[in-house]
Amino acid sequence: MTTSDGAAVDVGGAVAEQPHRLDKKWTFWFDNQSKPKQGAAWGNNLRNGYTFDTVEDFWCLYEHVFKPSKLSGNADFHLFKAGIEPKWEDPHCANGGKWTVTSTRKPGLEAMWLETLMALIGEQFDDGEEICGVVASVRQRQDKLSLWTMNAANEAVQMSIGRKWKEIIDVTDKITYNFHDDSKARTTKGRYSV
Ligand code: MGP
């Protein structure tokens, strides 16, 4: 038996351990960008991996699959709220944008990815409802991590999320925010920085 918060309760000498439920469901995705077929549309290799809503399933998926150090070549891992696809075309992302941090060191990306995952599933952001998810991009030249948010035009919310994210991943260098609409138009200018 368990208490309402999922703690174990001694039932006649046997301890029944219940999974620790998260506030919401999350989905891990994978995109192999190493061998894009000629003329293939973007997202052709994007795969919806696994949806989970317990701490135990999170650790199992993270340990066995979703570690950037397991990736070779160009590839992306994503953790998005269940029901939101990691694409500009998803209605939750369509008016959004992303904060991006780069890393030239593989261990740097791995640590920032894990800190971000734990902050998301642990609901550490005050404006968590404004976040779509996070993308880890492993690239030969420079790895990067992007935090996707919903309403790019809301500067106050983006600044609050950007500041909190820097604290979480322990980054002091400036990071910038891009609107997806600018990325679509192949403009790389950052709209906000923190
Ligand atoms: P990117 O992956 O956001 O840029 O988009 P990056 O990471 O600087 O480039 P990379 O070479 O290091 O991967 C790269 C290109 O992928 C864009 O210019 C688009 O052509 C395409 N693309 C990326 N995203 C996230 C999307 C998307 O959500 N929808 C569509 N249709 N195309 C996308």
Image: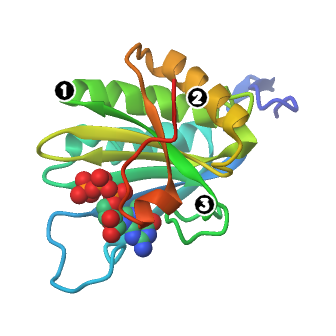
Badge 3 marks a residue whose secondary structure is loop
Q: Tell me the residue at 23%/64% (across/down).
A: 33
Rendering quarter of residue 70? top left
Q: Residue furthest right?
A: 4
> Is 24 displayed left or right of 165 in the figure?
right
Q: How is the image coloured?
A: rainbow
Query: Disc 2 beta carbon < 8 A from ligand 1?
Result: no
**Residue located beneath label 2 in the image:** 119
**Residue 142 can be seen, yes or no:** yes
Element at label 1 = loop
Q: CA distance from mark 2 to mark 3?
A: 20 Å
Query: Of 9 and 46, which appears nearest the observer?
Result: 46
| Mark 3 C-beta to ligand 1 under 8 Å | yes
Say which label, 1 or 2, has the lower sequence index. 1
The residue wearing badge 1 is: 105
Q: Position of residue 110 (x, y in %)?
A: 31, 30
Residue 163, numbered label: none
Instruction: Name the mark nearer the viewer: 1 or 2.
Output: 1
Which residue is nearer to you in this view: 86 or 83? 86
The residue mark sitting in front, 2 or 3, is 3
In primary-sequence order, the first of circles 1 and 3 is 3
The residue beneath circle 3 is 93
Ligand 1 found in image quarter: bottom left
Left or right of 178, for residue 152? right
Question: Which amino acid type corresponds to the residue marked 1 in the rendered image?
Answer: Arg
Q: Nearer the viewer, residue 71 or 191?
A: 191
In the picture shown, does residue 149 fall above or below 43? above
- Residue drawn 54% across and 50% down? 97
**Farthest residue in the bottom direction?**
39
Residue 22: in sight, yes or no?
no
Residue 114, percent across and down?
42, 30
Which kind of residue does numbered mark 2 sit on?
Ala
